[in-house]
Image (spheres, helix red, strand yellow):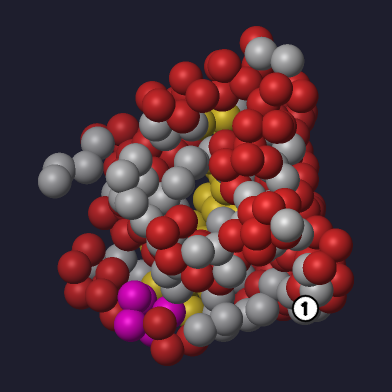
Amino acid sequence: MARSGTLRNAFQGKWALVTGASAGIGEALAVELAAARANLILTARRGDRLEALAQRLRSEHKVETQVIPADLADPAAPQQLFNATEGRGTAVDVLINNAGFGYYGEFVTGDPAWQRTMVEVNCTAVIDLTRLFLPRMVERRRGYVMIVASTAAYQPVAYMATYAATKAFDRMLAEALAEETARFGIKVSALCPGPTESEFGKVAGSPAAASRGRGFQTADIVARRGLEGLVRGKHWVIPSLANHATVFVQRVLPRRLITGAAERAFRPDSVKTSLKK
């Protein structure tokens, strides 16, 4: 499929850092950026996957790539990524804050350490990376920052309480930074996908049926629409018309009605069983 000339005009020859690039939406974003002739800095925990992707992008799109395995749950990782890129003279003009994960289940029975780590990766690492790279973009008077949030950012979600809260944080941060930095020629956007074919459900511990199915978008469509929205200067992008409609309904109906419906929709089988007793 031919890529938009708009993306190539925006990204050609620039260096883009993509976190969580080893699978899912992160990998798809890297592919779309390479197709637009951006050079890629790929980071995630799984170095073998990153190396395979880097080789593929070099071969198919003739772009430069750099692989930096890192775990963003480590507080030192953002600075290490900065030192290995901007610190060595590589101007990062595109920052894609994609790394993140979720948790499915009752809040009271969830592993506190796992949920704390989710906040570290989904929120703290986003702050640290953006705070490191954004000042250089301001100095150069150019740059793009994407923060991958979720349609869960628009409402509380029972049984995914911490995850939805982190994504609300991500969306609000992106929209605020978009206003702060516009005068410097920088574009910031929150990508807010709904259900997407990826490894998210497996990592979150959701039932197999929740991992993919009818109404799920492919990661490449989500990535392409997200990047197109970023280039157009949209402060947030919901890449599905159906999800747009759902978010609109959430804004006009009473909040308690929406959260109650979400609780029933996401209720785990263990809770359903206990309620029947």
Please give the name of the residue rendered at 37% of the width and 56% of the height, measured from the top-left corner.
Answer: 212
Residue 39: x and y in percent read 39, 62
Q: Is residue 38 visible?
A: no
Q: Quadrant of the C terminus?
A: bottom right
Q: Quadrant of residue 257?
A: top right
Q: Position of residue 36 (x, y in %)?
A: 30, 49
Nearest to the observer: residue 183 or residue 167: 167
Q: Residue furthest front?
A: 277
Q: Does residue 236 show up?
A: yes
Residue at the left extreme of this rendering: 1
Question: Magenta span: helix, strand or loop, mainly?
Answer: helix
The residue sitting at the top extreme is: 252
Is residue 180 shown above or below 274? above
Q: Nearer the viewer, residue 226 or 210?
A: 210
Query: Magenta region: which residues?
Result: 50-54
Residue 57, percent from left and from top: 28, 69
Residue of label 1: 74
Please, what is the three-letter code of the amino acid marked with disc 1? Asp
| Left or right placement of residue 232 versus residue 98 in this view | left
